Image: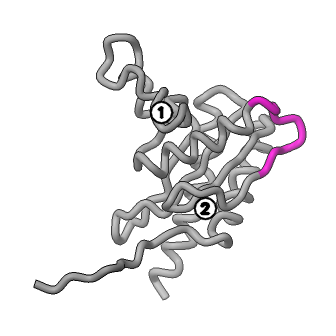
Amino acid sequence: MASTAKKSVPTLTLAGARTALAAAEKRAQEIKVPMNIAVVDSACHLLAFERMEGAKITSISIAMDKAFTAAGHRIPTSSYKEAVWPGGPAYGINNSNGGRFSTIGGGVPIIDQETGAVLGAVGCSTGLPSQDEDVASAGVDAVKRVLAVKAKL
């Protein structure tokens, strides 16, 4: 049985993060809600961040934590909506990871359609959770479009 001491892990590049950031910013402008937009790689490390003019200062770390959670747990942060209430199966999970685990909608993972691997995530904050998720999804969708084009080449 052969074993190795290392493996390659697909991850989002800085160019990919910039693609996500630009698309998310465009969507935020369309809905007229200035956002804090964070993009992380597959290891949950920040690649790119933007605070649009008028975005809430107190939402900076929230956007980063939403991206961290979506990449690290591999599902949108909105998935926790019903599970985190007292008595719910994930009650108290927001206290994990040094309090960084976000259960508020607005964090969306970027999943490689070919491999199913999480490449990173986009996290947005300032609007309602549904607005934050809409803007984050726009960033994710832009990266998926780029990946789809490259896969065809």
Task: Point out the frontmost of discs 1 and 2.
Answer: 1
- The residue shown at (42%, 72%) is 9
Instruction: Specify the label residue 58 is tagged with.
Output: none
Instruction: Estimate the x, y position of residue 121 in percent, counting from the top left.
Output: 54, 53
Please tell me in which quadrant of the rendered image residue 133 appears.
top right
Instruction: Point out the image quarter for the N terminus.
Output: bottom left
Q: Is residue 131 left or right of residue 126?
A: left
Instruction: Estimate the x, y position of residue 70 in percent, counting from the top left.
Output: 49, 46
Q: Is residue 126 above or below residue 30?
A: above
SS assignment at label 1: helix
- The residue shown at (76%, 40%) is 35
Instruction: Identify residue for label 1.
Output: 78
SS assignment at label 2: helix
For badge 1, the amino acid type reads: Ser
Asked if residue 54 lies in the magenta stretch, the reply is: yes
Q: From which residue to which does the magenta span run?
A: 50-58
Instruction: Estimate the x, y position of residue 67 in percent, counting from the top left.
Output: 57, 47
Q: Is residue 50 above or below residue 92?
A: below
Instruction: Specify the label residue 142 is tagged with.
Output: 2
- The residue shown at (40%, 78%) is 8
Report how far apart the C-alphas of labels 1 and 2 lie in the structure: 20 Å
- The residue shown at (48%, 38%) is 97
Determine crowd level at label 1: few under 14, some 14-19, many 20+ residues with C-alpha closer than 10 A.
some
Q: Is residue 97 above or below residue 12?
A: above
Q: Nearer the viewer, residue 88 or 94?
A: 94
